[in-house]
Image: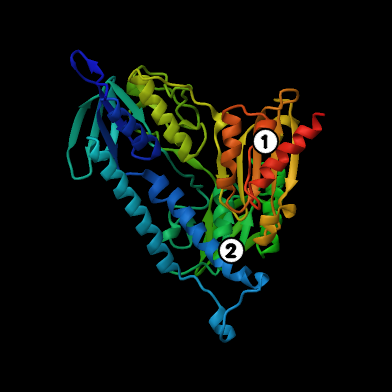
Amino acid sequence: MERCHLVNGRQKNVVIIGGGPGGYESALVAAQLGAQVTVIEQTGLGGAAVLTDCVPSKTLIATSDFMSRFASAGRLGVGFEGTDEDQHAQAHAKQVNERILGLAEAQSRDIRAQLESVGVRIKNGRGRIAGPGRVTAELTGGGTEELIADVILLAVGCTPRVMDTAIPDGERILTWQQIYDLTELPEKLIVVGSGVTGAELAHAYLGLGCDVTLVSSRDRVLPGEDADAATVIENVFRRRGMKVLNRSRMAAARREGDEVVVTLEDGREVRGSHVLLAVGSVPLTDDIGLDKAGVEVTRSGHIPVDRVSRTSAQGVYAAGDCTGVLPLASVAAMQGRIAMAHSLGDAVAPLNLRGVCANIFTDPEIATVGYSQADVEEGRIEARVVTLPLSTNPRAKMRNITDGFVKLFVRPGSTTIIGGVVVAPQASELIYPIGLAVQNRLTVDQVASTFSVYPSMTGSIAEAARRLHEAEI
């Protein structure tokens, strides 16, 4: 039975500014708990995650990975009949991007239909806090609407960071939101930034057949990830023909006709046909009335929240990338669900970031959960560690997988599993059993004594757990 939360004899009004994962997931929970829910969204349900970021980029990567299967078929003894010309697979940017945007729009429509089916009101426009308990919706079709809100949730997300010396033009100098307008693949693509977004998109375009140069300001790609995992990915990038420039920071990017020139801080110039800027993001928190509600922001513009998503202002919650907690759709959705449960009086558990499974969609993928190697090395946690290369896994050999490993972290004495790393194709699927173990505080013996299919990739997880048991003897 639905519970109807009342204020002075009426339903609670929940107003959500932003329709991304943090917004639409919280709307579903609030509606289930009996509140009157309104979502204000400017660009489309699903937000950037669905329309210009997560869904499109992962679809692009999936297309690239499909191409890679053709390239590696010969190593499995598989070929194509006919001439050499018939055997060449080629990606067509216009068709690829049309499919990507079509899938994103379909997902957005599905989200809208789901929200409308449970009674959520959707306002197309820009939301702004007008004062305590009041929100103004500036409607896309013209006019404004004033909304009374017992609970306000801010899920406004982020936008790509732009440097004054490298202004995107949407044609040759691009952000990651502009690449789906391309009608031809870049001949020579320069990717600036080797974090998650830069590494993923560099991998995608390399797989689609582009000449790719990755400009990294740090000692290695993916500097925030497990060092062993990042080393594997960088080695794979180089082996497949990507040019990786480490310790190289961009100073500027400019167009020269049909070329782009990226100038590095040491004076070097890198020339290409296109440049993709992946130099971070900034929260979309300007001019949304935060000061009128007394919502504090950091110097970077992020909205600080506690573990139940409360801001500094009573009745105002925030979720997603604008909070600066973790830039993951799953975290945004969880923050939003927790916010609604807390504000509407339902049972709630505070956000537990140690249980978050994260994935980088390179090839191989990198998936992580719980404590990391850096946590161990820097003394934040004491742990035993075992790393098992996938090269010994029989299923990996069958699939011609030579790069990757499984790494587990356990507490000494109790042998409770507290973290893990998987580097493998579809590591996003393989991390789940380790995530279950971390979330539910399972021991290595419990994991090791659980049957795994033979042969399977998950067999390496069970084997790693067995090795940690032996290390305790």
Instruction: Please provide percent x and percent y for residue 278.
Output: 54, 50
Secondary structure state at the residue bearing disc 2: helix
Specify the amino acid type for callout 1.
Ser
Q: Which mark is residue 299?
A: none
Secondary structure state at the residue bearing disc 1: loop
Task: Tell me which numbered mark, 2 or 1, is placed earlier along the sequence.
Answer: 2
Instruction: Please provide percent x and percent y for residue 63.
Output: 49, 62
Residue at horizontal 75%, vertical 34%?
468
Residue 156 or residue 248, whichever sits in front = 156
Kindly tell me whether residue 166 is visible in this rendering.
yes
Q: Which mark is residue 206?
A: 2
Instruction: Please provide percent x and percent y for residue 379.
Output: 74, 26
| Residue found at the far top of this picture | 8
| Residue found at the far right of this picture | 473
Residue 438, located in which quarter of the rendered image? top right
Residue at horizontal 28%, vertical 42%?
114
* Drawn side of residue 52 relative to residue 419, left or right: left
Residue 367 or residue 332, whichever sits in front = 367
Specify the amino acid type for callout 2.
Leu
Residue 431 or residue 471, whichever sits in front = 471
* Drawn side of residue 14 relative to residue 210, left or right: left
Looking at the image, do the residues carrying marks 2 and 1 touch, with CB atoms under 8 Å apart? no
* Drawn side of residue 18 relative to residue 368, left or right: left
* Drawn side of residue 355 relative to residue 59, left or right: right
Residue at horizontal 59%, vertical 84%?
84
Quadrant where the image shows the N terminus: top left
Crowdedness near tag 2: few (<14), some (14–19) or many (≥20) residues, C-alpha within 10 Å = many
Residue 465, located in which quarter of the rendered image? top right
Q: Which mark is residue 449?
A: 1
Q: CA distance from mark 2 to mark 1?
A: 41 Å
